[in-house]
Image (cartoon, rainbow, N blue to C red):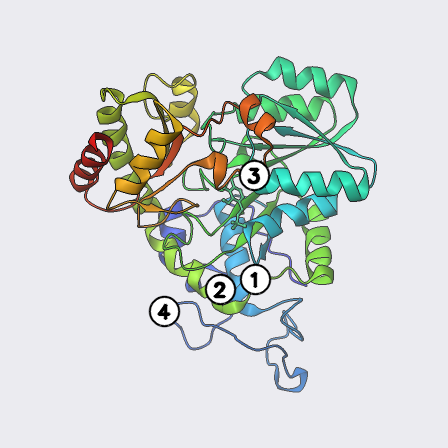
Amino acid sequence: MTTTKQNKKTMQLETLLANVSQNSNLKDSYGATHLPIYNTATFDLKRQVSNEQVYDYSRSDNPTRNALESIFAQAENGFGCVCTNTGIAAIALLFETVLKNYEHVLIERDCYGGTYRLLNILFEKNNITPHYADFTNLEEVENILKSNEIKLVVCESPTNPSLKIVALEELAKLTKSYESLLAVDNSMATFASTKPLELGADFSVFSTTKFISGHGSVTAGAIVSKEAFWDEKFKYIANAQGRAQSPFDVFLVSLGLPTLTYRMKAQEASALKITQFLENHPEVLNVKFPGLPSHPQYELAKKQLKIIPSVLTIELKSAEKAENFIKKSKLFGEKVSFGSADSRLEIPARMSHATNSEEDLVSKGLSHAIVRIAVGLEDTDDLILDIIQALNC
Ligand SMILES: Cc1ncc(COP(=O)(O)O)c(C=O)c1O
């Protein structure tokens, strides 16, 4: 197993991502311009020339995957990284490695539906108790930390789908003072916008299905650790459970990296223009986007996020109006996920967050009249014209 020691920040993110092959730990004697795909299950020990890293079986280690892991470790300023076959596999790896039976985890109430489902399974099978809180209220978080022995705290920022921004540095200080570990699901912000380990988190876990791969062509994930101790444990369990990402999928993710920050900045500008238009539309009751001054954590968002991810929600006057809006739109597909080149609409209450009971949805303020909009890379005015005709139908 390799461990990628990449704690030193040597170059700007855009420079690192522009040449993944060259800036990774890959030993390539041919000078390949892009990351070579080692699509092989096994390696012949007798023919290996490199003596630094011995490869024998791709479930344990593969040069293509290790290269991407070394790039992510550098991008997040962590010790090492494990790339997994989906984002939820990285979150499962986090839970199954860090938590033992009967331990407690504290998580933001407005977490991704798949994470919530996973915690319900762990509760039933392993007696792992989940506690939920509003992480924008650190007093509520502290009260839970005070009265329970919490092993792991997990948060998203922005949260999905309510788009709350959590003060990560303050949260990290708080979790440290109670000797808990902190993991940040960085799927939405990405390391192009926020670097949780630099703000005090122990783990940055993310789905690369979204902005990072950027083209909706692959499902994948990763977990970056601050310390060697946890990185080694994640690698050991990932191998034991067979969670590794395939070399071809690594290649697909790597194609999105050189353009990551440029795509995200263009999508942010487009989302801002769309939200400014929506705020003044008579059919729209409420718009949530951390880049708008009306957002409750606008000042924190400006400070903490280098780029605001292009995900927003609108509340329409009824569930029927929301259904109708989605049906009538021509440019936005009715699709889950976000961060791709194509714009998407969905109703979280019945798609990405359908694992929540109706009671949970109410407590999270997730009505069927709320539509999540993921803005892609189409022309902004085309998108606005499409929204106008879909809202007016
Ligand atoms: C915040 C967040 N975390 C994790 C995941 C899971 O990622 P994947 O779909 O790649 O398994 C998602 C998927 O939508 C997500 O939105």
Q: Secondary structure at mark 4?
A: loop
Could you say which disc has been placed on residue 268 in the image? Answer: none
Q: Identify residue for label 3.
A: 113
**Residue 325 sits above or below residue 92 on the image:** above
* Neighbourhood count class around disc 1 (C-alpha, 10 Å): few under 14, some 14–19, many 20 upward: many
Q: Identify residue for label 2.
A: 249
* Neighbourhood count class around disc 3 (C-alpha, 10 Å): few under 14, some 14–19, many 20 upward: some
**Residue 259 sits above or below residue 129 on the image:** below
With 327 as the anchor, is 248 left or right in this view? right
How much space separates mark 4 and mark 1, taking CA atoms?
22 Å
Q: Secondary structure at mark 1?
A: loop
Image quarter where the C terminus lies is: top left
Q: Nearer the viewer, mark 4 or mark 3?
A: 3
Mark 1 touches mark 2? (CB < 8 Å): yes
Q: Identify residue for label 4.
A: 33
Between disc 2 and disc 3, whose residue precedes? 3
Q: Amino acid at mark 2?
A: Asp
**Image position, residue 75 (x, y; %):** 48, 47
Between disc 4 and disc 3, whose residue precedes? 4
For ligand 1, tell me if the residue under mark 3 lies within 8 Å.
Answer: yes
Q: Identify residue for label 1.
A: 245
With 45 as the anchor, is 307 left or right in this view? left
How much space separates mark 2 and mark 3, taking CA atoms?
24 Å
Q: Residue furthest bottom?
A: 46
Between disc 2 and disc 4, whose residue precedes? 4
Which residue is at 65% across, 26% downward?
A: 132
